[in-house]
Image (cartoon, helix red, strand yellow):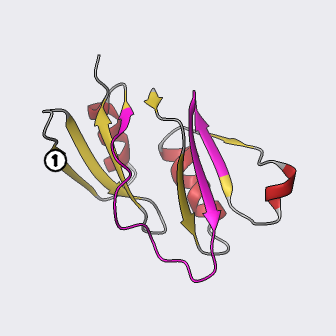
Amino acid sequence: MEMYLHHVQVSGPAGCEDAMRGFYVGVLDMTEVTKPERLRARGGAWFRAGAAEIHVGIEDGFVPARKAHPGIAVGDVEELARVVEAAGAPLAWDDNIAGLRRFHTVDPVGNRLEFQQAQR
């Protein structure tokens, strides 16, 4: 799946890495990348899709991000929505003010994400 973003960081509670791998790798078809040595002790995981990276950090006192990251652009938002729905993740459609098709979903620990059709 083509994604166009430079860096998105979300967080989760200790021990969430396997659930996040299931979502970001299994559903969104991203690849897990090795974190820099100096950051490994902090926990979490990093995922990449092409040039797109999503960093999942571990936080004490974790509270899910309730506000969606502004429009992670994808090559085919309809296709991604079908994959997300088939995985059983909640999904809500919403067209933005520019008329681009977009949807919101949540990852396994409750971080809200927004995906929109990339402008061509």
Residue reaching furthest top? 120
Residue 4 among magenta residues: no
Residue 81 sits in which quadrant? top left
What residue is pinned by disc 1?
94
Q: In the rendered image of this protein, does residue 25 appear above or below residue 38?
A: above
Residue reaching furthest right? 37
- Image quadrant where one finds the C terminus: top left
The residue shown at (60%, 51%) is 55
Q: Is residue 21 visible?
A: yes
Q: In the rendered image of this protein, does residue 60 appear above or below residue 94?
A: below
The residue shown at (16%, 41%) is 96
The image position of residue 58, as x and y in percent, is: 65, 68
Task: In this rendered view, identify the residue nearer to me: 31 or 88.
Answer: 31
Q: Is residue 1 visible?
A: no
Residues shaded magenta: 46-73
Residue 67 among magenta residues: yes
Mark 1 surroundings within 10 Å by alpha-carbon count, few (fewer than 14), some (14 through 19), many (20 or more): some
The image position of residue 117, as x and y in percent, is: 28, 31
Instruction: Identify the amino acid type marked 1.
Output: Asp
Total labels drawn: 1
The image position of residue 5, as x and y in percent, is: 47, 35
